[in-house]
Image: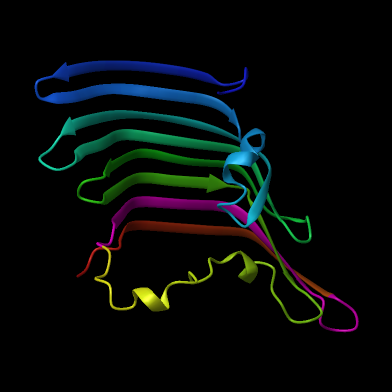
Amino acid sequence: QLDKSTTVKMNTAVGLDPLKADGKVEVAGVVLNRYAAYYKNLIPTDIQDGVLDVATGYRVAQAKDAFDVKLAGLAISLKTLQLKTRDTNQVFLTIPSLDVRNTAVDLLKQDVTVGEVATAQGTIVVVRSRDGEINLVKLLPRAAAGAATLADAPPARPWTVKATAVSVDQYRIQFTDETPSEPVNVSVEDLKLRAENMTTAED
């Protein structure tokens, strides 16, 4: 159940023979930290702040042994996102705005094509503690406990991800090294990144 600040719009056309559904759904104003109970065991960080808007067109059709699900025109907007480490309760990532536009997802083919990713004026805080541990390293996913027993299993089919344009503008990286007797602070300002036509596909 969504809270009162969230709006949902849905338009769907359904066919029965064969079974299929086409439509569009828009969800706006999702205050992320109100749903911590659903995701806190899935990610190693806490969401201090953040509002999510999502809109997409979709098509679901019954295939031979699975449902063929496609998303088109997927748009995601994140505003005022703040993530903090769970152990030290310190904010390490601030993103005033992040937009993903014109994205298509094919679940059957495991293919994602992103039209554009744009974000601006974010801040990343990196801290190396006195014992030499870097705060962001602890956020990386750890190997599953049963990975060794799955070594002989056939590899999962990889997803293919393509991004037409990525834009990172006016970012700031703040680094604090606490290993010296007097901590050292270094800042990188006005960081910009542009990338085009990136893909995980072979060749």
157 or 119, which is in the foreground?
157
- Residue 180 drawn in magenta: yes
Report whether 145 appears left or right of 176: left
Reply above or below: 103 against 158: above
Please check the rendered image and state whether residue 164 is part of the magenta-colored stretch, yes or no.
yes
In this view, the residue in front, 113 or 25, is 25
Residue at the image position 39 percent from the left and 58 percent from the top = 195
Question: Is 98 positioned to the left or the right of 35 in the image?
Answer: left
Image quadrant assignment for residue 153: bottom left
Q: Does the image show residue 80?
A: no
Q: How would you classify the magenta stretch by its main secondary structure?
A: strand
Q: Is residue 167 visible?
A: yes
> Measured from the top left, where is residue 36 in percent x and y?
64, 40
Decide if residue 63 is on the left or right side of residue 34.
left
Quarter of the figure that contains the N terminus: top right
Most extreme residue toward the bottom is 180
177 w.r.t. 72: above or below: below
Quarter of the image that includes the C terminus: bottom left
Q: Position of residue 62 (x, y in %)?
A: 15, 33
- The quarter holding residue 68 reads top left
Q: Residue at x 72, y 56 (%)?
A: 86
- Residue at 30% x, 63% y is 200
Q: Which residues are magenta?
A: 157-183
Q: Is residue 84 above or below residue 148?
A: above
